[in-house]
């Protein structure tokens, strides 16, 4: 519908025909909402915003691809710690990112737990 508005469609009835899925049950409200003063300036601004969204989406896709490539050397470690009960893929990602999957810097499991802030007595009291 936004694309149709941008290219100049202003007929509310034709616009409501573009509604999909759950929006179709709200045709009367949608029809009323489509009556207004959307002009060429609004179309220009909408186009700018949609183009920016598309650009940001493309960059996010590029970054995601790059992150996946950078994670590849750590895949074995990542998959291994995902087998630990309570370690989700996201948590494993954080562990790899924070430690570089090099546990040598932690002499014991307790040192790692302390560094990660998961040992008793590591919570700080906040003044409220």
Image (cartoon, rainbow, N blue to C red):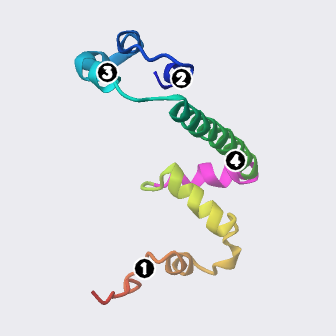
Name the disc covering residue 119, or none. Answer: 1
The spot of residue 64 in percent (x, y) is 66, 45
- Where does the image place residue 126, in percent across and percent down from the top left? 33, 87
Q: Earlier in the sequence, mark 4 or mark 2?
A: 2
Comparing labels 2 and 1, the label whose residue is closer to the camera: 2
Q: Residue at x 47, y 55 (%)?
A: 87
Which of label 1 and label 3 is nearer to you?
3
The majority secondary structure of the magenta stretch comes to helix
- Of marks 4 and 1, the one in the foreground: 4
- Which residue is located at x 69 percent, y 78 percent? 105
Q: Describe the element under mark 4 as helix, strand or loop.
A: helix
Q: Earlier in the sequence, mark 2 or mark 1?
A: 2
> In the image, is 5 to the left or to the right of 17?
right
Q: Earlier in the sequence, mark 1 or mark 3?
A: 3
Q: How far is the residue under mark 4 from the one under mark 1?
A: 34 Å
Give the distance between the C-alpha atoms of the residues marked 3 and 2, in whole angstroms: 17 Å
Position of residue 10 measured from the top left corner of the image (x, y, whole percent): 44, 17
Residue 23 is tagged as: 3
What label does residue 3 carry, if any?
2
Q: For label 4, count other residues whose C-alpha is less than 10 Å away and answer few (under 14), some (14-19) or many (20+).
A: few
Q: Which residues are magenta?
A: 71-84
């Amino acid at each position: 519908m936004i694309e149709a508005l941008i290219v100049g469609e202003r007929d509310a009835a034709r616009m409501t025909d573009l509604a999909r899925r759950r929006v179709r049950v709200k045709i009367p409200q949608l029809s009323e909402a489509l009556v207004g003063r959307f002009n060429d300036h609004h179309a220009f601004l909408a186009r700018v915003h949609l183009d920016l969204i598309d650009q940001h989406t493309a960059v996010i896709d590029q970054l995601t691809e790059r992150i996946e490539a950078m994670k590849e050397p750590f895949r074995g470690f990542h998959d291994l710690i995902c087998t630990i009960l309570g370690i989700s893929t996201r948590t494993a990602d954080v562990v790899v990112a924070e430690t570089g999957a090099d546990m040598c810097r932690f002499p014991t499991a307790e040192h790692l737990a302390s560094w990660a802030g998961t040992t008793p007595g590591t919570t700080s009291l906040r003044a409220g």
